[in-house]
Image (spheres, rainbow, N blue to C red):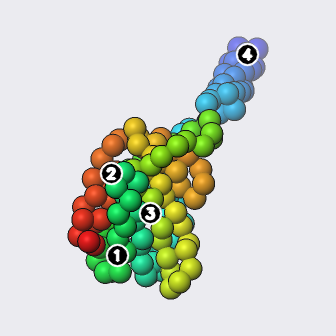
Amino acid sequence: MEMVKIIHVVILLLFVVTIGFVGFTEFTRDEPEKDIRSEILNVSYADVTKISIINGLSGDSSDIKDGKEITNLINCVSGFPFTEMEEQKDRNGYLYAIDFYEGGQRISTITIVGDGIVQINGVYYNSNTTQIERCVTDVFESGK
């Protein structure tokens, strides 16, 4: 009988330690990188009626109104992971500035700064890739 009580206490102790360990690791774990891929533009495809792109190197601009091109650009840009940067200081210059419009109202802005840095609606992110430039370049050239 005494042995059964000891086994029950040991099992209860193991259970409590396991729950405590799991809880401890949950609270001490670093916050995961904020992946905003799904909410990158905070717009739906149906809302965007025009995209205005400015090439920061040449000053050329292009307006995209074709629904297929709009969807392609949003899909391409939204396909990359973005991590919010700790340092939010302004940077000089940019490769592309992209404004998304619904009717005549701007609803979202992305600025591709370069070197994997992107500003989305005023917040800087690392994109961990320079391929995002290719998405914009392709659409920009088609809109000229």
Q: Is residue 139 left or right of residue 82?
A: left
- Residue identified by numbered label 2: 133
**Badge 4: residue crowd in 10 Å (few <14, some 14–19, many ≥20):** few
x, y (%) of residue 28?
Answer: 67, 27
User: Pointer 4 and pointer 3: residues touching (CB < 8 Å)?
Assistant: no
- Residue identified by numbered label 1: 64
Could you tell me which quadrant the N terminus lies in?
A: top right
Three-letter code for the amino acid on which mark 1 is drawn: Ile
The tag earlier along the polypeptide, 3 or 1, is: 1
Q: Is residue 29 above or below residue 49?
A: above
Please name which of the two marks, 4 or 1, marks the residue nearer to the observer: 1
Residue 34 shows in the view: no
Q: Which mark is residue 98?
A: 3
Q: Residue at x 37, y 67 (%)?
A: 61
In front: 31, or 84? 84
The tag earlier along the polypeptide, 4 or 2, is: 4
Q: CA distance from mark 4 to mark 1?
A: 74 Å
Q: Is residue 140 above or below residue 101?
A: above
Please name which of the two marks, 4 or 3, marks the residue nearer to the observer: 3
x, y (%) of residue 100?
Answer: 47, 71
Q: CA distance from mark 2 to mark 3?
A: 11 Å
Would you identify the image quadrant in which residue 74 lies?
Answer: bottom left
In front: 12, or 2? 12
x, y (%) of residue 39?
Answer: 52, 61
- Residue identified by numbered label 4: 6
Disc 3 element: strand
